[in-house]
Image (cartoon, helix red, strand yellow):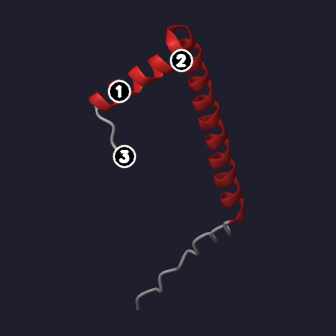
Amino acid sequence: MNLGMPEILIILLVALLLFGPKKLPELGRGLGQSIREFRKGAQNIREEFEQATSLNEPSKPAPVAKAEEPKA
C-alpha cells in the first residue's frame, strides 16, 4: 500500500476535523511514543532470537593440517 501526497493530506484534514487543533499535538506525541516503544520491543526480540540461534549452532571443528608427502 503506497500513500501519495493527496491521500496524506486528506487523512490529515479528516484528523483535524475529528480531533481539533488542540488535540492533534497530543495524539501525534502519543503515536510517536507508541511507534518508538514498538520498535524497541521488536529490536529486543530480534536480538534475543539471534543470540539464541547463535548458541544453538554447533561450533565448527578446526581445520586439520595435512602434511605433504615427501617426493622421492
* Element on which disc 2 rests: helix
Sequence-first tag of 3 and 1: 3
In the picture, measured across the screen, residue 11 lies left or right of residue 28, that is left
What residue appears at the point 47 percent right and 86 percent down from the top-left corner?
A: 69
**In terms of depth relative to the viewer, which is nearer, 43 or 17?**
17
* Element on which disc 1 rests: helix
**Numbered tag placed on residue 53 in the rendering:** none
Q: How many labels were placed on the picture?
A: 3
Q: Position of residue 63 (x, y in %)?
A: 57, 72
Q: Quadrant of the C terminus?
A: bottom left
**In terms of depth relative to the viewer, which is nearer, 62 or 52?**
52
Q: Amino acid at mark 3?
A: Met
What residue appears at the point 57 percent right and 26 percent down from the top-left corner?
A: 31
Seen in the picture, residue 53 relative to 72 is either above or below; the reply is above
**Numbered tag placed on residue 1 in the rendering:** 3
Q: Amino acid at mark 2?
A: Phe
Residue highlighted by disc 1: 10
**In terms of depth relative to the viewer, which is nearer, 35 or 47?**
35
Seen in the picture, residue 48 relative to 39 is either above or below; the reply is below
Classify residue 35 by image quadrant.
top right
Q: Nearer the viewer, mark 3 or mark 1?
A: 1
Give the CA separation, mark 2 to mark 3: 25 Å
Q: Position of residue 18 (x, y in %)?
A: 50, 21
Disc 2 residue crowd, few under 14, some 14–19, many 20+, Cα 10 Å? few
**Numbered tag placed on residue 19 in the rendering:** 2
